Image (cartoon, rainbow, N blue to C red):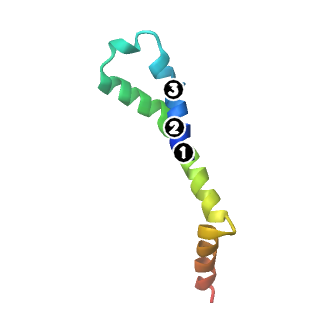
């Protein structure tokens, strides 16, 4: 949910969508340009979120830690 909200906020603040004349481009051109603009920051945010889950000492992080420990048992 947080990633979704962050992505929506990035799109709303997008240079691509807020550039004068953007309405003259095709939808395909706008989507392609928006993807180029947002892909790296959105993937970075997603990656950080996943690592937070993995490193969390509760829930998923705990389960993954236990799996890693089993390798050494």
Residue at image location 53% in from the left, 47% down from the top: 1
Residue lying farthest to the top in this orientation:
20
Residue 18, image x and y in percent? Answer: 49, 17
Residue lying farthest to the right in this orientation:
57
Most foreground residue, 52 or 4: 4
Residue at image location 57% in from the left, 57% down from the top: 50
Q: Please tell me in which quadrant of the rendered image residue 5 appears.
A: top right
Q: Residues within 10 Å of mark 1 (few under 14, many from 20)?
A: few
State the residue position of label 3: 12
Q: Quadrant of the C terminus?
A: bottom right
- Residue 28's mark? none
State the residue position of label 1: 3
State the residue position of label 2: 7
Q: Is residue 54 left or right of residue 8?
A: right
Residue 65 visible in the shown view: yes
Residue at image location 67% in from the left, 64% down from the top: 56
Residue 9, image x and y in percent? Answer: 55, 32
Q: Is residue 25 left or right of residue 39?
A: left
Residue 41 visible in the shown view: no
């Amino acid at each position: 949910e947080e990633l979704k909200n962050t992505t929506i906020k990035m799109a709303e603040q997008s240079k691509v969508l807020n550039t004068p004349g953007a309405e003259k481009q095709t939808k395909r051109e706008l989507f392609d340009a928006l993807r180029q603009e947002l892909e790296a920051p959105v993937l970075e945010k997603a990656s950080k979120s996943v690592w937070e889950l993995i490193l969390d000492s509760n829930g998923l992080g705990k389960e993954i830690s236990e799996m890693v420990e089993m390798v050494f048992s």
